[in-house]
Amino acid sequence: MKKIGIIGGGISGLYLANILNNNSNFDYKVFERKSNFNFLEGYGIQLSVNSIKLLNKLNFNNLSASEVCFPTKVNFFNSNNSKKICDINLSQFNDDQNRYTTTKRSTLLKFLLKNIPKEKIRFKTTLTHVEEGENTKVYFSDNSQENFDYLIIADGIFSQSKSIILNKSFSPKYNNSIAIRANLKGYNFENISIFMGSNFHYVTYPINQNNEYNFVAILKKKLTTSDLDYNKNSPNEFKYLLKKILNKNSIIKFENLTEIKAFPVFVSKNFPNINQKNIFFSGDALFAFSPSFAQGASQSIETAQDIFDCIISKSDHSYKNRFRKIYSINLRSKINNFVFHLSNPINIFIRNIILKYLSKNKKFLENYLGKIYRN
Ligand SMILES: Cc1cc2nc3c(=O)[nH]c(=O)nc-3n(C[C@H](O)[C@H](O)[C@H](O)COP(=O)(O)OP(=O)(O)OC[C@H]3O[C@@H](n4cnc5c(N)ncnc54)[C@H](O)[C@@H]3O)c2cc1C
């Protein structure tokens, strides 16, 4: 029986734990820094069909229908007059069994935790040291030590374990933008709406069937290193900025937002380079992109699946292929971010004409979205 250690109990680590849990050839353990999971946050997540296909193999489609939504369109608006520019039909990428889905992040986490026995997760534990070899010796912050055949690093964007394993500091870079997340009520949108403004965009989508919505705004903002020390930074400044934006003809009213949280957006600079055949990086610890393509969670799930396939097949083929896919998603995230934030009125005028055309161009959509969504 192969022993697998998973560092980080986020979307990627828990997805992998679920596949291993269904396979009696493996023994596994998840090591999580936090003391427990937070299910109270109501923020949302978008899951495109590429990850839904994998989640449905774990019976995600048996979740109560009231806890998920299946948006069929992405609507694009000018934020300064709330006029619709165009829409993209998302359902063209669905199949009979798998549909583009939005839900609460906590609903996904609860689902991923449902079948994992309690003794398989060790909380308040981080990796401190690794001795590589055919059988990797791993040392933990609680002074314990375990041997694993495979070690999976899935401790998120600020992965400490990555720096420990690669023996050099590996920090993500600030993406010159601030994300503001909130819960939204009092509307009746069925679909995903993207409102584009000068140097910002915001997105709303339903997260269940109870008229609850996710709101996330991405504002371009240069910050110095000391500004980036989040504790020194006043989130109220960003809330004020958001209020000003929404007061300008937006159909989303600032007063309808609750649990507003602002934080700087970080992205990966490059892929971690590792020669060790039995250590894998997954999810944001492997590569984190800007949230403008809404693929972070889906890629975290797909990469975890690739890692499992590699372990089974004893070949790193699918893991290496994933790098190519992540590279193309990163490019699309950057393009989206640029296009959504244009500020010059002439550029905006031209962008809107191009968007109207491309949003109905099957060839373009298949290439830009279909390639990613259809796996
Ligand atoms: C504003 C915003 C909006 C987003 N919206 C979407 C979206 O709509 N759709 C989408 O697909 N993606 C979205 N993403 C991206 C997505 O949230 C991430 O890509 C995804 O959560 C990454 O999963 P993960 O498992 O790699 O990491 P995480 O979910 O961050 O999990 C990492 C886990 O590791 C634990 N941990 C941390 N350090 C250690 C340590 N040293 N030892 C042990 N455990 C540790 C953490 O506590 C955590 O539980 C968004 C991101 C942002 C910033």
Image (spheres, grey):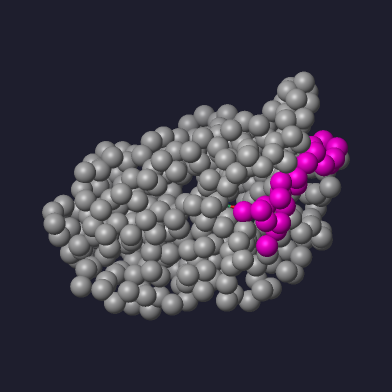
Q: Residue at x 48, y 63 (%)?
A: 54
Q: Position of residue 114 (x, y in %)?
A: 47, 76
Q: Position of residue 63 (x, y in %)?
A: 59, 75
Q: Which residues are magenta?
A: 70-93
Image side of residue 294 versus residue 20, left or right: right
Vertical placement of 52 versus 242: above or below?
A: below
Q: Position of residue 208 (x, y in %)?
A: 69, 67
Q: Residue at x 22, y 54 (%)?
A: 278
Q: Position of residue 26 (x, y in %)?
A: 27, 71
Q: Nearer the viewer, residue 65 or 45?
A: 65
User: Residue 327: which quarter of the image?
Assistant: top left
Q: How many marks?
A: 0
Q: Residue at x 23, y 68 (%)?
A: 3
Q: Nearer the viewer, residue 41 or 3?
A: 3
Image side of residue 125 versus residue 235, left or right: left
Q: Nearer the viewer, residue 370 or 333?
A: 370
Determine if residue 359 is in view: yes
Image side of residue 164 versus residue 210, left or right: left
Q: Nearer the viewer, residue 115 or 322?
A: 322
Image side of residue 133 versus residue 200, left or right: left
**Quick one: which residue is furthest to the front in this view?**
363
Q: Is the N terminus in the top left, top right, bottom left or bottom right quadrant?
A: bottom left
User: Residue 293: which quarter of the image?
Assistant: top right
Vertical placement of 252 versus 355: above or below?
A: below
Determine if residue 129 is in view: no
Q: Is residue 314 magenta?
A: no
